Structure formats: structure tokens, C-alpha cells
């Protein structure tokens, strides 16, 4: 069962039959250890509610399309950052988008999603160009998607941890930009 299928049932955990492992050459800082949490009911419920509320608030606004397209781009960039996109990651991203949208998307969304799938240079910087078009209130959902995509295949690669660190630095720089 995938994480997003479980989320629909209010259970947001890595499947119990799958143990997360971290490459031996990856050292996680204390604030990154949340990546390894497998079952935190309060966090699951909070994220489920946040995603539903965010999606409902943005629906029928000019922010909805950049939100959906940006989330897909980020998910694909995270999945691709370790050099391969495994089936579990594809499933997570698809089910995430299905959960977030909870409805049929117009064809233009599918066209943009297909274009992202075919991007040769979809990397962190490209993903952040999409996130930069998103409303700042959606960035917590982006953070959650990054974490879930990293956990999707049960292996946390060095490149995925680096992507996560860059994301946190990007967020910090945007917080600074808004403060001045």
C-alpha cells in the first residue's frame, strides 16, 4: 500500500513491511531525523488536514494551477535526484496529485505534467523555479511531499538528503527575503 493511498484512510506511514535504510555514507543531522519517523499519528492527521485545507482554499483561484504543477515538478525532481525514478516513487507522486486534486484535472494540467515528465534537466533548481510560482502558504505541503518522496522506496540516498538540505536552505533564504 502506498503512502498516499494510506493517507486517504488517514494513515500516513511508510508501509510496515518496508524498513527505511540510510546509506552508510549519509550522516543525518538531528533535525533531519524526522525523515525516519514511521508512525506519528498527530503529524499524519495534521498533514492530511493541511493538504485538504490548502487544496480547498486554492481551488478556483489563480494559485491552484501553480500549486498542482509545482508539486508534481518537486516530486519528480526528488525522485530523479538519485539518478533513477523507481516505481514506488512514481506511484507516490501520482497518488499524491490524485489526493490533492480530488477531481479530474483540465487537459492543460495534464499537458504541463507530461512536459515535466519529459524534462531532461529536471533538478533542484528547476523544481524551485516551480515552487517560486506557488503561494508561500503551500510550501509546508511541498516540504511534506519531499519527505514522502524520499521515503517512498524505503532507501534514503545521499542525493535525497542533499536535496532536502538544499530545500531547507532555499526556504531559509526566502524567509530572509520576506523579512527585509
Image (spheres, helix red, strand yellow):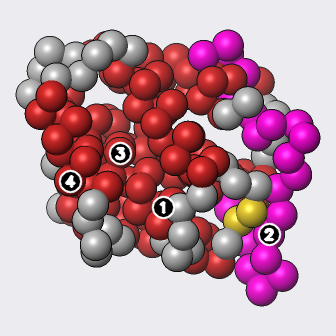
Q: Secondary structure at mark 3?
A: helix
Q: State the residue lying farthest toward the bottom.
A: 25
Tag nearer the camera, 2 or 3: 3
Label 3 close to label 4 by CB (< 8 Å): no
Q: Between disc 1 and disc 3, whose residue precedes?
A: 3
Q: Earlier in the sequence, mark 3 or mark 4?
A: 3
| Upstream in sequence: badge 4 or badge 1 | 1
Q: Residue sitting at 35 percent across and 21 percent down?
A: 101
In the foreground, 102 or 29: 102
Q: Is residue 157 magenta?
A: no
State the CA–CA distance, disc 2 to disc 1.
Answer: 16 Å
Residue 68 relative to residue 42: left or right? left
Label 2 crowd (10 A; few <14 / some 14-19 / many >=20): some
Give the residue drawn at x 74%, y 72%: 28
Q: Which mark is residue 78?
A: 1
CB contact under 8 Å: marks 2 and 1: no
Count of marks, rendered view: 4
Residue 72: numbered disc: 3
Residue in front for this viewpoint, 136 or 65: 65
| Cβ–Cβ under 8 Å for marks 4 and 2 | no
Examine the image and state in which quarter residue 39 appears: top right
Amino acid at each position: 500500500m502506498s503512502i498516499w493511498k494510506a493517507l486517504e484512510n488517514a494513515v500516513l506511514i511508510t508501509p510496515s513491511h518496508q524498513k527505511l535504510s540510510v546509506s552508510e555514507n549519509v550522516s543525518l543531522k538531528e533535525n533531519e531525523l524526522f525523515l525516519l519517523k514511521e508512525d506519528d499519528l498527530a503529524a499524519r492527521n495534521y498533514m492530511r488536514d493541511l493538504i485538504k485545507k490548502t487544496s480547498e482554499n486554492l481551488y478556483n483561484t489563480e494559485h491552484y494551477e501553480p500549486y498542482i504543477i509545482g508539486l508534481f515538478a518537486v516530486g519528480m525532481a526528488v525522485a530523479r535526484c538519485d539518478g533513477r525514478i523507481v516505481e514506488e516513487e512514481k506511484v507516490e507522486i501520482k497518488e499524491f496529485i490524485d489526493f490533492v486534486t480530488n477531481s479530474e484535472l483540465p487537459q492543460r494540467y495534464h499537458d504541463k505534467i507530461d512536459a515535466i515528465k519529459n524534462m531532461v534537466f529536471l533538478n533542484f533548481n528547476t523544481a524551485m523555479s516551480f515552487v517560486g510560482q506557488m503561494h508561500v502558504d503551500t510550501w509546508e505541503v511541498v516540504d511534506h511531499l519531499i519527505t514522502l518522496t524520499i521515503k517512498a522506496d524505503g532507501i534514503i540516498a545521499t542525493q535525497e538528503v542533499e536535496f532536502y538540505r538544499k530545500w531547507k536552505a532555499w526556504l531559509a533564504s526566502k524567509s530572509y527575503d520576506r523579512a527585509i
